[in-house]
Image (cartoon, rainbow, N blue to C red):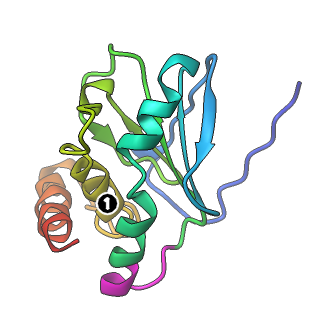
Amino acid sequence: KIFTWKQPIPCSSYLIALAVGDLESRDISDRCRVWSEPSMVEAVRFEFDQTETFLKVAEDLAGPYRWTRYDVLCLPPSFPFGGMENPCLTFVTPTLLAGDKSLADVVAHEIAHSWTGNLVTNATWTHFWLNEGWTRWFELTI
């Protein structure tokens, strides 16, 4: 099989990611979906079913979401971070699956990066802290 992918919106090279595996998905909305291993997909959908709501609030605050889709991929336990805001497909760790949505705000943080870090980013790694600083403020506002 050949897959072709085109990214019409410029983005930093550190934001490009690829995921391959035995994955299933569940829709949250027309533009949001969750992905995970089949045994976890319903738990992932439950935990992150507020994703569209977070996205709409962020748009009300910062303007239209430019990346079209916002999907969340729950990776196997070896993923060492809470989340990574790759455009169109945020990676999250299964340690966020608390069963009560208490850690779903990590997705709000990664959504915030869609504006503060993905569309506008630092020129060098010296100022990378600005991405996280503005994003943390935006996440708390969402």
Q: Secondary structure at mark 1?
A: loop
Is residue 63 on the magenta stretch?
yes
Residue at 33% over, 21% down = 79
Q: Residue at x 31, y 51 (%)?
A: 107
Give the quadrant of the C terminus. bottom left
The region drawn magenta spans 59-65
Q: Which residue is mark 1?
A: 113
Residue at image position (55%, 65%) is: 67
Which residue is more in the foreground, 59 or 39? 39
Residue situated in front as seen by the camera: 127 or 6: 6
| The N terminus, quarter of image | top right
- Extreme residue in the right direction: 1
* 15 over 65 or under it: above or below: above
Given residues 7 and 43, the one toward you in this image is 43
Q: Is residue 15 above or below residue 32?
A: above
Residue 63 falls left or right of residue 104: right
Q: Estimate the x, y position of residue 119 in percent, counting from the top left.
A: 41, 68
Determine whether, in the image, residue 38 is placed left or right of residue 124: right
Snapshot quadrant of residue 4: top right
